[in-house]
């Protein structure tokens, strides 16, 4: 490969990666908005956003699979989330059968009914499932903790 | 007996190693990242081992003026002109409040950390950080790293 061709390749790689990052992150942001709105206003629909084998760790409590998640979210008091920050990164998938995967970290405040307000942090691993018509994002892993967990 | 799951063992080992390196000699952190690694530090994105290590290293500025270091211009064969700013503090100490580890569908590990840190003579601040760990050639490396200070939390 000539040096000029090589430089072009690197340029294209960078552009593609940046575009890829931007697209992935915009999709993730949309997903996050839907997630917290569903959590606050349509709690029973929330598990539709999770993969069948998804795991959640909620303030140290491990919840695995849709049935357990369903029970958990039913028990959790009603919520008012306010997201203040969001960071997002695509995950480099080197396996051939990999689906697009994105990591999202959110933080903000939450008030559960009957409890005081807390600062929270949440990490999602999201997987894109593409159909001919659209792309559906679902949660593969979810980790939630109060920032002030030790003293809460 | 209740042995911890393997991903918790690996995750907590990594966490311990990472913060020990970070607090004692952050120039050594390069070994845990690869060329495909991404770091998001307080909202700034860094791509690749070299850029990450540059960011995490000790600042080359003479002293701290109004909380910012001199920006460092970095040009490499692969990258466009980057404006990088190394971390401005000399001393740092992390204290972990809680950590969570989960396996991912493709055999990686996500680790999430919540804690507090103290940099130089600054007041203690809360932070949270997330790592995605991948096993490459029998070594666990970090492919994704996201760090944020809990700036709103004055508790």
Image (cartoon, grey):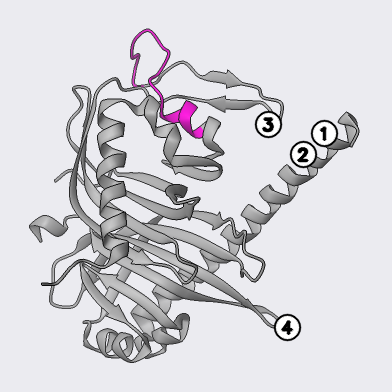
Q: Which residue is mark 2?
A: A10
Q: Quadrant of residue B151?
A: top left
Tag in front: 1 or 3? 1
Q: Over which residues does the magenta segment extend? A: B52-67
Disc 3 is attached to a residue of which chain? B
Q: CA distance from mark 1 to mark 2?
A: 5 Å
Marks 2 and 3, how far apart in space? 9 Å
Q: Determine whether label 1 and label 2 are within 8 Å by CB.
A: yes
Of callouts 4 and 1, the N-terminal one: 1
The image quadrant of residue A146 is bottom left
Question: Residue A142, position in %: x, y?
Answer: 37, 70
- The residue lying at 65 percent from left, 59 percent from top is A23
Q: Dot 4: what SS?
A: loop
Q: Secondary structure at mark 2?
A: helix
According to the image, label 3 marks what residue?
A: B79
Q: Quadrant of residue B79?
A: top right
């Amino acid at each position: 490969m000539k040096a000029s061709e090589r430089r072009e390749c690197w340029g294209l790689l960078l552009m593609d990666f940046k575009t890829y990052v931007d697209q992935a992150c915009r999709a993730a942001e949309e997903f996050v908005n839907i997630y917290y709105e569903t959590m606050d206003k349509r709690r029973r629909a929330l598990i539709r956003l999770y993969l069948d084998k998804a795991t959640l760790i909620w303030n140290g409590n491990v919840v695995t699979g849709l049935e357990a998640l369903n029970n958990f979210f039913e028990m959790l008091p009603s919520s008012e989330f306010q997201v203040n920050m969001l960071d997002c990164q695509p995950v480099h998938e080197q396996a051939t059968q990999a689906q697009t995967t994105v990591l999202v970290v959110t933080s903000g405040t939450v008030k559960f009914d009957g409890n005081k307000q807390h600062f929270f942090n949440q990490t999602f691993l999201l997987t894109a499932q593409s159909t001919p018509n659209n792309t559906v994002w679902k949660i593969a892993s979810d980790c939630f903790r109060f920032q002030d967990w030790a003293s809460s | 007996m209740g042995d911890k799951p393997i991903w918790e063992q690996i995750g907590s080992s990594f966490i311990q190693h990472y913060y020990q390196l970070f607090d004692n000699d952050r120039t050594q952190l390069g070994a845990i990242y690869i060329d495909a690694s991404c770091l998001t530090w307080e909202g700034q994105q860094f791509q690749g081992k070299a850029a990450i290590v540059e960011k995490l290293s000790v600042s080359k500025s003479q002293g701290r003026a109004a909380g910012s270091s001199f920006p460092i211009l970095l040009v490499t064969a692969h990258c466009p002109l980057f404006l990088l700013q190394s971390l401005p503090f000399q001393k740092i100490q992390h204290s972990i409040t809680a950590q969570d580890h989960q396996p991912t569908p493709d055999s990686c590990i996500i680790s999430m950390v919540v804690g507090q840190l103290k940099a130089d003579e600054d007041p203690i601040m809360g932070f949270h950080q997330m790592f995605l760990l991948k096993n490459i050639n029998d070594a666990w490396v970090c492919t994704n790293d996201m760090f944020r200070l809990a700036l709103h939390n004055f508790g």
